[in-house]
Image: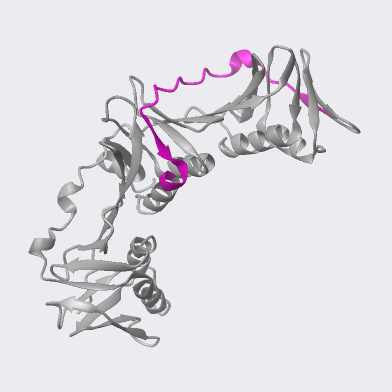
Amino acid sequence: MKIRIDQRQLADAAKRAHRRLPNNPLQPILGGLLLETDGDSVTLSGFDYETSTRASLAAAVLEPGHVLVSGRLLADVTAAMPAGPIDLVVDDNEATLAAPGTTFTLPTMDRRDYPALPEAPAPAGTVDGDLLAAAVVHAAQASMPDKEAAGNLEGFRGVHVAADGDHLTVSASDRYRIVRHRIPWTPEGETSGELLVPAANLAATVKQLAGGPVQISFTGDVAVAALANATVTVTSRTIGTPFPNIDGFFPDPAKAAGWMRVDASELLEAVKRAGLVNDKEVDPVLLAFERDQLTVSGGTEGSKGASRIDVEAADLDGFTAGYRPGFLGSLLAPIDGHVQVWFTTPNKPALLVPVDDDTYRAVCMPVRIPS
């Protein structure tokens, strides 16, 4: 194999692919990156049995072939080489990367021991990569930690993406919070389909692909979903347990005891300030209403803090409820402008919806207030 390729292009692809590989793989070969010629381009691939990354790179292919080398070494070496064209020459035992004044030689791995990469299902549609990244990264924060998502709770450790006509719904929950975003997309053919991928994995993927259109391939005959932009395709094994049906856990505004409207950023800052004096992250901040004024307070004995905010409220005079500040804050963070919050009782979940925006809604479970 002999190719000539741009240093920056190869270094960037190697860095991105290496980041998706395990730091301490059970099998050393899973720490490798595979380069294969394909006509007048080179495909760089990495795979750890859970996630595969394929990047298509323009190159001058002088002799076709393939090579498997350490992903860490390839990323470090190519980053250190001078800008401009690099010559990559492979023989039976080593790969040599050369540029004017610089040469590196890397040992090769046995290609025959490398696992076959999964095939991506056919694309189901296209979505704006930046919108997808914003929705998935935020939803991932509300997923359940892997160590807690055992047995029939396993579905809660993922982010669920489902086609709904010309929109995608992006959902996640840890049973204390529910997040749901709706973003536009352009389906190809049938509009049904879904995927459920571990939250951290999917968040890393959408950040890697952001910056342009992203094609989504939903789970096919095998438990693999795929996302791709113009140059990179990432496949991920999906979670075997279905995502729980959370629709019934969104409170009905018609059954609420009362509601408030307030600037989301103002409420978020008040929640953060109140949480500063709490001893533990699980300690609640209290939301207490008196006519059209909301007091957000934290702390118990010793350190205490409170902020008063003018709000528009209905039927909440004398109402008090407690919420974990990190949870409530995370649900307020993506809202630009005013938020409307519906309350039922201090022990039942609250519904948060941006005013004049139907693309996002969230649910926050309260914390029982010590008597």
* Residue 41 percent across, percent down from the top left: 65, 20
User: As displayed, is residue 146 above or below residue 177?
Assistant: above
The residue nearer to you, when weighing 167 against 326, is 167
Farthest residue, direction left:
255
* Residue 300 percent across, percent down from the top left: 32, 83
* Quadrant position of residue 252: bottom left
* Residue 67 percent across, percent down from the top left: 69, 18
299 inside magenta stretch = no
Farthest residue, direction bottom:
302
The residue nearer to you, when weighing 344 against 29, is 344
* Residue 64 percent across, percent down from the top left: 70, 11
User: As displayed, is residue 174 above or below residue 340?
Assistant: above
In the picture, measured across the screen, residue 342 lies left or right of residue 119, that is: left
Farthest residue, direction right:
101
Q: Residue at x 64, y 34 (%)?
A: 13
Q: Residue at x 80, y 34 (%)?
A: 84
**Quadrant holding the C terminus:** bottom left
Query: Is residue 35 among what the camera can see?
Result: no
Q: Residue at x 37, y 79 (%)?
A: 274
Query: Is residue 112 among what the camera can see?
Result: yes
* Quadrant position of residue 226: top left
**Quadrant holding the N terminus:** top right
* Quadrant position of residue 94: top right
The magenta span reads: 104-132
How is the model colour-coded? one colour
Q: Residue at x 35, y 67 (%)?
A: 337
What is the number of callouts on the image? 0
